[in-house]
Image (cartoon, rainbow, N blue to C red):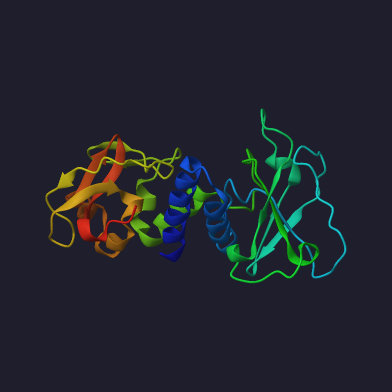
């Protein structure tokens, strides 16, 4: 469940970052999580980490056609991207944010030694070996709820006897109506299924899930204990 909680946390930070005037601290918080769990997001589309030397490092514009792969190496989690894959129509040429030491829980002595550069532009395409956030959440769901795989359709929806529903892995639905009964025998609120991982162990099969199923704007939800909701 750790990766799913990390996904939820990162998703929330990115939403807060979009609305914030000063994005620096939220960018660093998001970057720390993205690098730790090898997530690809708006703040980690391209990361270049210098070796521990005082030599300068050469960075490439995101629009370059080079097929060179740059390793993302931070907090011990390697990852690679095509520089050309992070360009997006309508975006300005590459601009970079400097991520400070607080983003990694370490310290940097000088700019020339360990500074990490992060491209600001959101990628449109990803290296096939790099998990995007929704894929991570879906894989975690299938791991924690094995029977869910049998309900999944090719387009990522699930089919129950009552209909076909999306999982809403990229959605943030704020309207959470009260529901009468959770798996913990308490009144709860209807939340998207992936947002209530604490009750996954209680959802032992499809029939059990149906007892606590609720619909949120066409997406599959579950009656989640109020005191444990994590958004």
Q: Quadrant of the N terminus?
A: bottom left
Left or right, 53 with respect to 182, comes to right
- Is 85 or 14 nearer to us in this picture? 14
Residue 173 against residue 91 in the figure, above or below = below
> At 45% from the left edge and 46% from the top edge, which residue is drawn?
16
Q: Residue at x 70, y 37 (%)?
A: 87
Position in image of residue 75 (x %, y %): 63, 68
Q: Quadrant of residue 74?
A: bottom right
Q: Is residue 138 left or right of residue 96?
A: left
Between residue 171 and residue 117, name the one nearer to us: 117
- Residue 168 screen position, x and y as percent: 38, 42
Q: Is residue 152 depicted above or below 205 in this figure?
A: above
Residue 51 horizontal/vertical position (percent): 79, 67
**The one of 3 and 162 positioned closer to us in this rendering:** 3
Q: Residue at x 75, y 41 (%)?
A: 62
Residue 128: image location, x then y, percent = 64, 48
Q: Is residue 177 left or right of residue 121?
A: left
Q: Residue furthest right?
A: 55
């Amino acid at each position: 469940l750790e990766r799913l909680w990390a996904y939820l946390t990162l998703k929330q930070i990115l939403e807060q970052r979009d609305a914030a005037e000063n994005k620096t601290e939220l960018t660093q918080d998001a970057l720390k999580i993205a690098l730790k769990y090898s997530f690809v997001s708006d703040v980690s589309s391209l990361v270049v980490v210098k070796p521990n030397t005082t030599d300068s490092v050469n960075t490439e514009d995101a629009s370059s056609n080079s097929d060179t792969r740059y390793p993302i190496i931070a907090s011990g989690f390697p990852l690679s991207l095509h520089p050309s894959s992070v360009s997006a129509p309508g975006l300005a040429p590459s601009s970079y944010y400097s991520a400070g030491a607080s983003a990694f829980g370490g310290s940097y002595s000088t700019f020339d030694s360990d500074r990490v550069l992060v491209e600001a532009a959101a990628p449109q395409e990803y290296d096939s070996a790099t998990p995007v956030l929704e894929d991570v959440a879906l894989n975690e769901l299938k791991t924690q709820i094995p029977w869910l795989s049998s309900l999944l359709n090719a387009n990522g929806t699930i089919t129950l006897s009552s209909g076909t529903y999306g999982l809403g892995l990229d959605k943030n639905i704020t309207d959470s109506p009260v529901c009468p009964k959770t798996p913990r025998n308490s009144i709860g609120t209807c939340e998207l299924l992936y947002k209530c991982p604490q009750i996954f162990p209680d959802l032992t099969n499809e029939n059990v899930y149906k007892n606590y199923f609720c619909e949120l704007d066409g997406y599959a939800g579950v009656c989640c204990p109020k005191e444990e909701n994590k958004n």
